[in-house]
Each structure stands twice: as C-alpha cells, then as structure tokens.
Amino acid sequence: MSDIKRIETNQRMSQAVVHNGVIYLAGQVGAEGESVAAQTTAILANIDRLLSETGSSKNRILQTTIWLANMDDFAEMNAIWDAWVPQGHASTRACGEARLATEGFKVEIICIAAVE
Amino acid sequence: MSDIKRIETNQRMSQAVVHNGVIYLAGQVGAEGESVAAQTTAILANIDRLLSETGSSKNRILQTTIWLANMDDFAEMNAIWDAWVPQGHASTRACGEARLATEGFKVEIICIAAVE
Amino acid sequence: MSDIKRIETNQRMSQAVVHNGVIYLAGQVGAEGESVAAQTTAILANIDRLLSETGSSKNRILQTTIWLANMDDFAEMNAIWDAWVPQGHASTRACGEARLATEGFKVEIICIAAVE
C-alpha cells in the first residue's frame, strides 16, 4: 500500500490522494452561506495548501472540474479563478451546474495535479 | 494497443479501462426504482467486482465522484458508503446533484483506482 | 515544468494537458443554439483534433464524462456518440444532467486519453 499516500483521511474520504506522480484532490468547498467570490477564494486557498502538502503547486494542475450551484454565478467565480491561475500554466477545465451537498455551498472545485 | 485493457466493452462504453497502472470505471448504477440504499449497495458491489477483475480492490481507490439525482438522499447514500470504505483507505470524493440517464436511477458512482 | 505540455492555453484554461503519457481534455462544447446532434458532432471533431495534436486518437480514450443540459436529449446524443466510437475501443463513460456555462450549450464532453 505504500505506493498510495492519503492526506486528511476520515471514514468518508481523503482530502488528497497521491499515486504514481499524480495527486487527486477531494471536491473543495468554502464556508456555507458566504458569497461565491469568498467561497471561491477559500477553495483556491485549500487547493494551494493541499498541493503544497503533496509536493506540488498550482503551476502543475492537470484537470479541473468546477460545479456551481447556480450557473448565474459563473462570472463571479471566474473573476477569482482567472486572477489565481498562473499565466501559461492553466489546467484543462469544465464547469457545470450541480446542487451541492448543502444549500449553503455555492461552488465546489475538483483538481488532478502532477507531483513536482 | 496492448497497453490498454478494456473490460465489458460494447459499442457505447467499457465498464473498466486499465492503463499504466490506473483503472478507470464507468459510472456505476443500481436497479432502476430501488431505494437509494439498495442502489448504492448494488453500485458498491459492482465496483468491488470490477476492481477485482482488474487486479485491484476498494483499498486502492484514488478518486470518487458521486452523482445523486436528489441531494436530499445524501444521508441515505452516505450511510452505505461510510460502512463500505475500508478504514484508512478512503479515496478523495466529490458529490453533486445531477439528473441521471433515466428517472429510476437515483445514484451513480465513478471511480479511478490503482492496480495492485 | 517540461514534463507537462499544455495546448491552446489562455488565462482560464488549456484545451489539453499532457503528463506522464496521459492527456486531459477540457470540457468540449459545440456552437451555442445548434441541435444536440450538431453540437455532439462538433464536440467529437474537437476531441479528434485535440487528440491528434497530442499524439493520440479516439482509439485510446480512457474515461469520458458527458453532461447534457437536458437528459431528454440522451438518445439524440447517443446516436452520434455510438457511431463515432471505434469498435472494441470504447472508453468508460458517465452521463449526467447539468446546466452548462450558457443556455445555448446542450452538451459538454470531458475526456482522459492515453498518448500513443
């Protein structure tokens, strides 16, 4: 099992799993009820932290999936996203609307990244 | 092509594809119209079977995506999920609401795992 | 950074990212407002093109995720999909309903593939 590394593991999920040079992150959320911009900012800070803990960074994200509880928030999320992405290192991306685990969550972001 | 192994392949999809030590599973569903608990139980049995056939197990899941047709079923799905996950080996996870291929499907689970 | 190759990169996303023999494609869409069949056809042509540019082909897709803005379009999308998939080389697949970035988009397809 030592070829798989799991971070912040509980009975339901791990926040990050590393295998064969690839890091899978759990869907990251912000604080329930906050604005889309605030939740997106918190999510991206979570991603920075988890990638740092697994020996990577936002320069090395391969695939991103974004779920918005309401697609009307697309522009508000994108403003934060676009400012955070390092120039020349943007991951692939897909964004769809999906009701999230609780009504207070407005954004959820799922990443796959490469170890440094 | 011999570096890619496909399991239960028809004209639309394969139920599992193995490449470079990583197993991708098709979105698994249960029996239409059954309860969320019953569908989740059937899905997890499918996952156990497909991972066994591809030389892996639930101890080695890297990423899980769960779609619920109705997020109100979150707790009912989680009760089955949490009991099934092997302690210390939880994958990453994201769960969103999405209407599925037919009205009778209430849960769909997509996994990426590592070969043993 | 030279172990990650990015294609058609802007400040928001790349259309394809290649790492360790695996290609991640951005969610592909067609022309807003066209029929589901026309959008699906355009998407699959985009996928063919991006896989060709990254040294792969539709014979080597590992995982596909399909989002439909309206699941009632399932059969119309599938007719195009089934005709496009090369016999014996079908990827895994999952299909869920999600409202997309703009109302005019009816289908979005996300693929992971293996380099040749």
Image (tube, coloured by chain):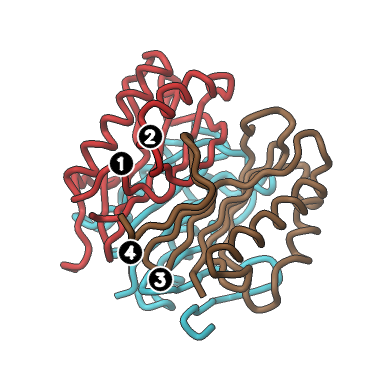
Chain colours: A cyan, B brown, C red
- Alpha carbons under labels 2 and 1: distance apart: 7 Å
Neighbourhood count class around disc 1 (C-alpha, 10 Å): few under 14, some 14–19, many 20 upward = many
User: Nearer the observer, disc 2 or disc 3?
Assistant: 2
The residue to which callout 4 is attached is: A58
Q: Position of residue B88 (x, y in %)?
A: 65, 79
- Mark number displayed over residue C58: 1
Residue under the image location 33 percent in, 55 percent down: A84
Vertically, is C79 above or below B95?
above
Residue under the image location 75 percent in, 35 percent down: B32
Vertically, is A19 above or below B105?
below
Asked whether disc 2 touches disc 1, contact meaning CB atoms under 8 Å apart, the reply is: yes
Task: Please report, as a chain letter, where disc 3 is located.
Answer: A
- Which amino acid is tagged 3? Leu
User: Nearer the observer, disc 1 or disc 3?
Assistant: 1
Disc 2, SS: loop
The residue to which callout 3 is attached is: A51
The residue to which callout 2 is attached is: C85
Neighbourhood count class around disc 2 (C-alpha, 10 Å): few under 14, some 14–19, many 20 upward = some
- Which amino acid is tagged 2? Val
Q: Position of residue B115 (x, y in %)?
A: 49, 70
Q: Is residue A39 visible?
A: no
Task: Please report, as a chain letter, where disc 1 is located.
Answer: C
Asked whether disc 4 touches disc 3, contact meaning CB atoms under 8 Å apart, the reply is: yes
Observer-nearest of C116 and A60: C116
- Alpha carbons under labels 2 and 4: distance apart: 34 Å
- Which amino acid is tagged 4? Lys
Residue under the image location 43 percent in, 78 percent down: A53
Asked whether disc 4 touches disc 1, contact meaning CB atoms under 8 Å apart, the reply is: no
Q: Position of residue A57 (x, y in %)?
A: 33, 69
Disc 3, SS: helix
